[in-house]
Image: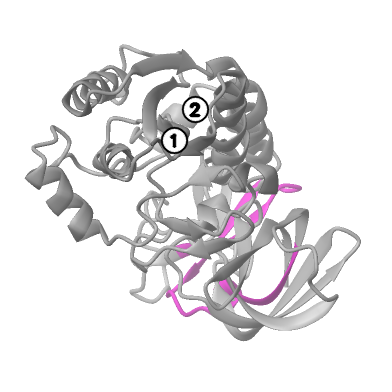
Amino acid sequence: MSKGKVLVGLSGGVDSSVSALLLKDQGYDVHALFMKNWDDDDGSPYCSAKEDFMDAVFVSEQLNIPLEQVSFSKEYKENVFEYFLEELESGRTPNPDILCNKEIKFKEFYKHALANNFDFIATGHYVNTDHKNLYKGLDETKDQSYFLHAIDKEVLSQSLFPLGEVKKEKVREIARSNNLITSEKKDSTGICFIGERPFPEFIGSYLKGEPGNIVDERGEVIGTHPGLVFYTLGQRQGLGIGGVKGAADLPWYVAKKDLTNNELMCVQGNEHPLLFSNELSTKNLFLLDDTLPNSFDGTAKVRYRQRDQECKIFIENDKMKIVFKEPQRSVTPGQSVVIYNKDKCLGGGEIETIN
């Protein structure tokens, strides 16, 4: 007897392929859906959607499961990409993957599944859930709870994550032993659904940068920039700062974006004090646990793959303030901070201010 009807987000990668296989082996009635969410430049060498769809077709045939393709490109543009551009213009560095998960993979995909009488949705994310709470995946190197901290709790209650207790090496082994076409396929990176294209070139086709000066911490001009939208705090590559008279032989890093004067401040050395901050506050707070006290000790991370950092957490009026035990490097407004109690993900918010 079937455990229920589940719609798997089949991306054409090895993780979603193995997820579909495992669910079928566990006794679920498995169907697959390939999401097409970016239509602007299907002829681009960076767009792998056609190849990914063909891989999804092959996998669905190998597993003998039905596959449909649905486009959420309109919803992606309106609810993810436009906000992404607005944040860049405001001097922040947004994380579209988090918004993509919240608005597309665990909203539009979920709504489509409900409308078609599915009991569950499933993805290849490395996280765990008891259908009430979100937990880190077993594989610490692949845990994706950071990216899923803002999904709706109702959706979480009907989501399955078959890879939550599986390590990446084992996923590859399972794919190979079942001769899945995706067994050796490289993991995708880059902006959610848009791929691994050069960021300045891509953003430059949507936003017009205003050229300005690059200054050091004393305000001395040391170079020029094509627009603040192309830079993020802590950035080292692509600054174009040549030999500066009297400067040490150390790499330069972005320490501040001054929108008022259209200046990019850079400092030398990755341990420079101006690259560090002790506190942050958030906007757009989303909590998976609504029983949290107003203040408590916990851990947090301000970027994916960062080790959990000890901190004091204060929550009031849909805002969160975090005071870290140790100074944090390159905390970036627009990115997300995610809080934890051991392996349990408590939620998070977008970084608004740093101090």
Q: In this rendering, would 291 be left or right of 191?
A: right
Counting from the top left corner in percent of width and height, residue 238 is at 38, 49
- Whether residue 207 is visible, yes or no, is no
Height in image: 327 above or below 257? below
The numbered dot on residue 183 is: none
Say what amino acid the circle numbered 1 marks: Pro
Observer-nearest of 337 and 150: 150
Observer-nearest of 208 and 55: 55
Q: Main secondary structure of the magenta part?
A: strand
Within-10-Å neighbours for mark 2: few <14, some 14–19, many 20+ = some
Counting from the top left corner in percent of width and height, residue 274 is at 60, 74
Element under disc 2 = helix
Height in image: 164 above or below 300? above
The CA distance from mark 2 to mark 1 is 6 Å
Residue 197 in which image quadrant: top left
Say what amino acid the circle numbered 2 marks: Gly
Height in image: 277 above or below 243? below
Counting from the top left corner in percent of width and height, residue 227 is at 56, 38
Element under disc 1 = helix
Is residue 277 within the magenta segment? Answer: yes
Residue 300 in which image quadrant: bottom right
Q: Are marks 2 and 1 in contact (CB under 8 Å)?
A: yes
In percent of the image, x 52 and y 52: which residue is there? 147
- Mark 2 — residue? 204
- Mark 1 — residue? 200
Q: In this rendering, would 245 be left or right of 77?
A: left
Is residue 60 within the magenta segment? Answer: no
Which range is magenta?
253-281
